Amino acid sequence: MAPTTNTLDRTNYLNATKGFMSWFWTIDHKRLGLMYLWSVIACFIMGGFFAMKIRLNLMPGAVDFATQTAEQMNAYNNAFTVHGAVMVFLVIIPSIPAALGNFVLPMMLGAKDVAFPRLNRFSYHLWIIGALLFVATLLIGNLDTGWTFYPPYSTGHTDPSVITAVLAAFILGFSSIFTGLNFIVTIHKMRPPQMTWFKMPLFLWAIYATAIIQVLATPVIGISLLLILVEKTMQIGIFTPELGGDPVFFQHLFWFYSHPAVYIMVLPGMGIMSELFATFSRKPIFGYKSIAMSSIAIAIFSFIVWGHHMFISGQSDLMSVIFSALTFSVAVPSAIKVFNWISTMYKGSISFSVPMLYGMSIIWLFGIGGLTGLFLATLGTDVVFHDTYFVVAHFHYVMVGSALFGFIGGIYYWWPKMYGKVVDGPLAKVGCLLSFLGFNLTFLPQFVGGSKGMPRRYAAYGSEQGFDDWNYWSTMGAMVLLVGLSIALFALLRSFFVKGTLSPANPWGGVTLEWQSPSPPPEHNFEIDPPTVGDPYDMSLVKYCGEVEGFLPVNPRADDPCVAYIEPEEA
C-alpha cells in the first residue's frame, strides 16, 4: 500500500504555532524567506501608494501649471523621492534574491539551509532597520532630493530626513552584501557531489550572478552615501562645489553601482523565467549553457557601462563613444536568453498556468525595455531623450515590468511549496491580464510623450504644451494596474486564509530538487537525502502526475490521484 500520510495534517515546522519571537529569532531559511516576502509586499503597497499619488497629481487639471504653489511642488517631489527610494531599495532589489531566493535556493541544492544561517537572519534584521528608517523619513521631514540623492540636492539640503534616508540606504546595502555573500558560499560549498556547475538549475545561476554584483558593487554605493553623511555633518568638501567638491564625482560612484543594480533586479527574474518555461512547456530548456553563461556575462558587462547615464555630464566624446559601444554589447547576452526561452516554448506542450502567464508577459515587457534601451545607448538620440519620460518608461519596463512580473510569477510558482496550496486559477489569471494591460497602458504613452519632449520630474504641465493626453492615459493605465495587482494579491490571500486546493509535493511536474520535498517542507527540507537528477530539465523523467523517476513519492496525501499510479514496490 502507498503511504497515506497527509503532509498538511502532520506537525510542520512552517505551520507550527510557536509565537512571534520564534519567527523573529529563527535561522531557518524558509521562514526568513517568507518574512522577506511579506515585508517586501508591505513596502510595495507603500511605494505603490506614492506612485498613484504621482499619477493623480499629473492627471490633466489636477494641478494648475501657472498657479501651482511651492507646497504643491514640494509634496510632489517628496512623493517622487519616496516612491523611487522605496521601490528600488526596499522592493525590487530584495524581492527575488532575498525572498524567493532564500526560500528555494537551499532546497534546489538539496541542502538543509544556507551556509551561514545566523548571518542570514542578521541580514533580515538589518533590512528591517533600514526599512523602518525609510518610514521614519515620512514623519520627520520632507525628503525631496530624488531617489538618487544627487548633490547638491542632498548635501545642501537642511531637512533632517535626508540624513535618515541616506543612513537607511547605507544599512540596506550591508543587508544586500551579506545576503549575496551567503548565497555565493552556499552555491560553492553545499552542492551535492553529483551536481556540477552545469547541472545546476538556471535560477541558481541567476542568483549566483546577482550575488557577485551585490558583493562587488554595493560597497561603492555604501561608501558614496557615507561620504554624503560626512559632507553634510562635517562640511567637508567632497561633492558640493561651494566646499570645493565635485558633484559629477558622485554621479560616477552612484551609477557604477546603480547600473549593475539594474541587473540585481532583473537577473533573478530571468532565472525564474527559465524555470517557468521549462516546466510549463514540458521541454528541456533550450541552450542551457548559453543561458547560464549569459547570466555571468551580464554580471561582467554591468560593471563597465555606467557612463551611458552621463552622456551629457561633460565627459569626453571618446569616453561617450566607448560607453555607447559597451552598452550595445550588453544586449547580446540578454537577447540570448530571450531567443532561448522562445525556442524552449517552440513545439512544447505549453500549460497556460498562472505562473506561465507571468513568464510570457515578461518576454513582451523585457523586449520593449531592451529595445528602447538601444535608443538610449545611441549618443544622438540619448541627448534628445535624456531627462524625458522616454527614460522613465524605459527603466520601468526593465526594472519594474521584468522584475515585478518575475517576482509575482515566482510567488505563484512556489506558493504550493510555501503553503501547500495551489492558488485559485481564474481569479489569478484575471489579475495577471489586468496587470499586463494596465502596465502597458501606463508606460507606452510615456514613450510617446517623452519622444515629444515631455520632461520628467515636473509636478504639473501646461495644457498648451500638448502632454495632457499622454498623462491622462498613463494615469488611467496606473488605475488598471492597481486593480490587477490588487486582484493578484487577493487571490494569494484568499488561497491562504479561505480557499485553496491542497497541493501535492510536485503540482507542476518540475524536475528540480525543491519539488522532491513535502509541501510545505519540514524543518530541514527533506525527510530523506534526495539523489541528484543528471539534467535539471529532463522532462522525460517526470511521471505519475509529477513524481520524478528515481525518487520515492514524498508524503502523498491519501486522496492524491497520483498515488494510484505508483506501484507498491516503488513506494
Image (tube, helix red, strand yellow):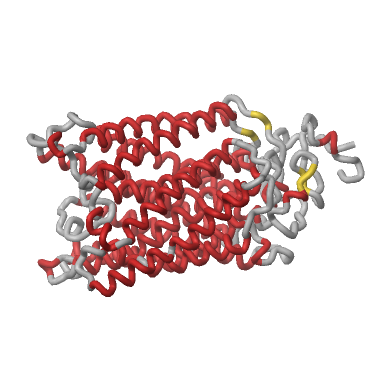
Viewer-nearest residue: 279 or 126: 279
| Residue 527 percent location from the top left of the image | 75, 49
- The number of discs equals 0
Instruction: Report whether residue 130 is seen.
Output: no
Viewer-nearest residue: 261 or 142: 261
| Image vertical order of residue 137 relative to residue 326, above or below | above
Residue 390 vs residue 538: left or right?
Answer: left
Quadrant of residue 384 in the image? bottom left
Instruction: Report whether residue 441 is seen.
Output: yes
Residue drawn at x 27%, y 57% as measured from the top left: 381
Residue drawn at x 48%, y 32% as measured from the top left: 433
| Residue 378 percent location from the top left of the image | 31, 61
Viewer-nearest residue: 374 or 160: 374
- For the N terminus, give its image quadrant: top right
Residue drawn at x 17%, y 50% as measured from the top left: 159
Viewer-nearest residue: 465 or 100: 465
Quadrant of residue 505 in the image? top right
Residue 258 vs residue 246: left or right?
Answer: right
Residue drawn at x 55%, y 38% as measured from the top left: 357
- For the C terminus, give its image quadrant: top right
| Image vertical order of residue 99 relative to residue 497, above or below | below
| Image vertical order of residue 568 relative to residue 115, above or below | above
| Residue 61 percent location from the top left of the image | 17, 29
| Residue 56 percent location from the top left of the image | 26, 32
| Image vertical order of residue 83 relative to residue 27, above or below | above
